[in-house]
Image (cartoon, rainbow, N blue to C red):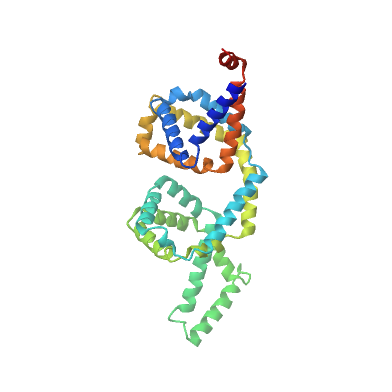
Amino acid sequence: MEKSKQLIELHVKYQMNLVAPENIKNTLTEEVKEFTNYYYSKKFKDIVTPEKLKILSTETLEKFNLTENLIKMARNLFVVNQEIIKFENETLDKYISKSEFLKAADSAIGLKDIRNKFINFAVHSSAYARMMSSIILAAIKDFMMENPLTKNNPIGGAFLKIGGDLLNNLPGMQGNFEGKVNDFISQNLSGRIKQSETFIQSELDSDRAKEIMEEFWEFLSKIKLSETSGYVDPNSIDSLFSTIPGFYDHIKKSGFLERQIVENINSFYEKYSDTEISSFIEEMGITKEDLDRELAETFFPLIDSESFRNYYKSTIERRFSNFYNSDEVKSILDE
């Protein structure tokens, strides 16, 4: 019994020395290296088969639900970040460079098929048609009021009034000439809408798109980050977050997410099944040294505390006690 107690104490002391404040970083670094050394030469298919990964992934998807507490947490994180932004008084060009913005904008504009689909949807919507009708009617009215023949001319103004009264009283007008003009514009707008769609697409296909992005950057870069915190209404955010669980449940039940997961796993293994982890990581532009360092630095704050050491000590004391007091070990110690 005395021997087993001594062995337990020595073993615990040895292990606790490894996680002492002055040693824990080196211990963790070595453990990480040993772990990555084991997996580094393995192929993806040898670690987990695509079939097993698909089962695990789809089971996780089935069990995972967006609970009310998760939504509250996400909303609170959003609110906290909005509060932080309130005190950021630098303009946006402090955080985003012009070259990076223009490069991203150019890439987005280059997504021609998606862009044209969006333009087509936008210009053929009822809201766009109403806007176009309103603009054309306003332009006609402004032209009549700003026409050099009538502007600041009492006689011309009287002529317009008389003409307007006359037109309003024509058969079929029912005293609503403006409304009839607007109806005519709306009924004959399809050609103008198609013309505007073609114009927008050609503008974005030309060098003019770069000019538009330059103009947008000049506007955007002057906005203070703190100003953007007021762009979002808190009530609208609450309403938006409240819709997320229903949206997620609906799309999950549709089978879309499961199909996406399965097809992405198939695609990944089709390309990387026989690839060693080392080659994959290097393809991502990461060296083993970088990986080891980042993993160690990630886990270090989680275990470099007295709370963890106390937990670790109680755990190994219990396990070592069970081991050294087992019948097998006792039989050896008693020899």
Residue 280 image point, x, y percent: 38, 32
- The image shows residue 136, relative to residue 128, as above or below, that is below
Q: Quadrant of residue 86?
A: bottom right
Image quarter (top left, top right, bottom left or bottom right) of the C terminus: top right
Q: Is residue 318 left or right of residue 157?
A: right
Residue nearer the viewer, 277 or 101: 277
Residue nearer the viewer, 154 or 316: 316
Residue reaching furthest to the bottom = 154
Residue 7 image point, x, y percent: 55, 25
Q: Is residue 25 left or right of residue 246?
A: left
**Which residue is depicted at the point 42% across and 45% down?**
113
Image quarter (top left, top right, bottom left or bottom right) of the N terminus: top right
Residue reaching furthest to the left = 207
Residue 97 image point, x, y percent: 37, 58
Q: Quadrant of residue 64?
A: top right
Residue 66 image point, x, y percent: 63, 41
**Which residue is depicted at the point 45% across and 35% down?**
27
Q: How many marks?
A: 0
- The image shows residue 200, relative to residue 303, as above or below, that is below
**Which residue is depicted at the point 41% across and 40% down?**
293
Residue nearer the viewer, 191 or 290: 290
Query: Looking at the image, can residue 237 be seen?
Result: yes
Query: Looking at the image, can residue 323 be seen?
Result: no
**Which residue is depicted at the point 56% across and 28% down?**
56
